């Protein structure tokens, strides 16, 4: 498995500091949950890891197996094994879902080792089946006209097919009804079991609910641009039961 190391990460958006020294290490085979109130920088963290141009890293480092991620272009980060399931997946007209998937898979492979068409179709059918995705979605343009739930399932389809080293799932549970949540969790859990190489998951979520379906090894709380507390699944349970106030008090954080 791979290791993603985030050290003292500071990130600005349009001159405003959003991340103020984030430290986090995710190893292959581990599932980490990052929780925290809205606006604390969770999505900023995922965008910075993936290299979104709007997010300027002013200090700190991100290493994937010791390689400097911040020196990599966006496509190089994906090729190196980083994957982000976005909170708000974008629609791309003119590119079909299956074309996008196939080129994403092949982008991670060496020349001459591209996935064969038959193997690709077989894998895609199987994974779409697991995720209860309608066959017609493979030939539709990427996310165009997809419902919120279909977009989220489609992000997990990408995850299952691209097989990244480290997957970041940003609010994959938001806008999902309980049935869709179960299906999406099933896909992620299946992948966690199947992947003998052990892939790492960074799961960003506002609600504890998701963690009933995908059990994290570690739980981190982000507030005001920092990871302020880390623990096991019991930390998420306490947040669900008591909210964030006790933690704010413990840390002396004002709203
Ligand atoms: P979270 O995901 O924890 O809800 P975000 O990372 O989305 O938080 O946002 C953190 C802060 O950064 C918020 O104050 C938000 O308004 C600001 N922010 C996020 N993205 C942008 C952007 N593209 N342009 C300007 N401000 C942004
Ligand atoms: Mg938010
Ligand atoms: Mg967010």
Image (spheres, rainbow, N blue to C red):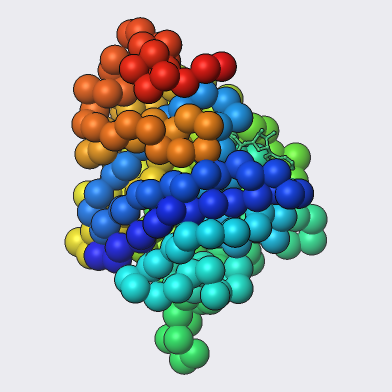
Please, is residue 57 above or below residue 169 in the view? Answer: below
Residue drawn 64% across the image and 32% down it: 148
Residue drawn 60% across the image and 73% down it: 73
Q: Residue furthest front?
A: 252
Residue drawn 33% across the image and 31% down it: 229
- For residue 43, side relative to residue 13 (left or right): left
Determine the quadrant in which ligand 1 lies: top right
Locate residue 122, reporting x and y percent.
42, 63
Please, is residue 218 above or below residue 9 in the view? Answer: above
Locate residue 105, reporting x and y percent.
49, 70
Locate residue 68, reporting x and y percent.
45, 73
Front one among 249 and 221: 249
Q: Is residue 203 visible?
A: yes
Locate residue 141, reporting x and y percent.
72, 54
- In this rendering, the count of numbered labels is 0
Front one among 155 and 124: 155
Q: Is residue 90 visible?
A: no
- For residue 18, side relative to residue 229 (left or right): right
Q: Residue furthest right?
A: 93
């Amino acid at each position: 498995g791979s290791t993603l190391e985030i050290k003292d990460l500071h990130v600005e958006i349009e001159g405003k500091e959003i991340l103020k020294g984030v430290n986090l290490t995710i190893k292959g085979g581990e599932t980490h949950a990052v929780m925290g109130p809205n606006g604390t920088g969770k999505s900023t963290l995922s965008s910075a890891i993936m290299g979104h141009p709007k997010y300027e890293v002013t200090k700190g480092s991100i290493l994937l197996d010791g390689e400097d991620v911040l020196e990599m272009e966006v496509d190089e980060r994906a090729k190196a094994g980083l994957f982000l399931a976005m909170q708000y997946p974008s629609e791309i007209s003119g590119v079909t879902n299956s074309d996008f998937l196939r080129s994403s898979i092949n982008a991670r492979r060496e020349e001459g080792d591209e996935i064969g068409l038959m193997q690709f179709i077989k894998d895609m059918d199987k994974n779409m089946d697991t995720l209860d995705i309608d066959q017609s979605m493979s030939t539709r343009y990427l996310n165009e006209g997809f419902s919120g739930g279909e977009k989220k399932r489609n992000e997990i389809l990408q995850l299952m097919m691209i097989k990244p080293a480290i997957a970041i799932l940003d609010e994959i549970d938001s806008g999902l009804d309980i049935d869709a949540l179960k299906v999406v969790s099933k896909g992620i859990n299946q992948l966690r079991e199947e992947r003998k190489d052990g892939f790492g998951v960074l799961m960003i979520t506002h609600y504890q609910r998701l963690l009933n379906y995908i059990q994290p090894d570690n739980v981190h709380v982000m507030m005001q641009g920092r990871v302020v507390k880390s623990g096991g699944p019991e930390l998420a349970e306490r947040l669900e039961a008591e909210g964030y106030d006790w933690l704010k008090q413990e840390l002396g954080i004002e709203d």
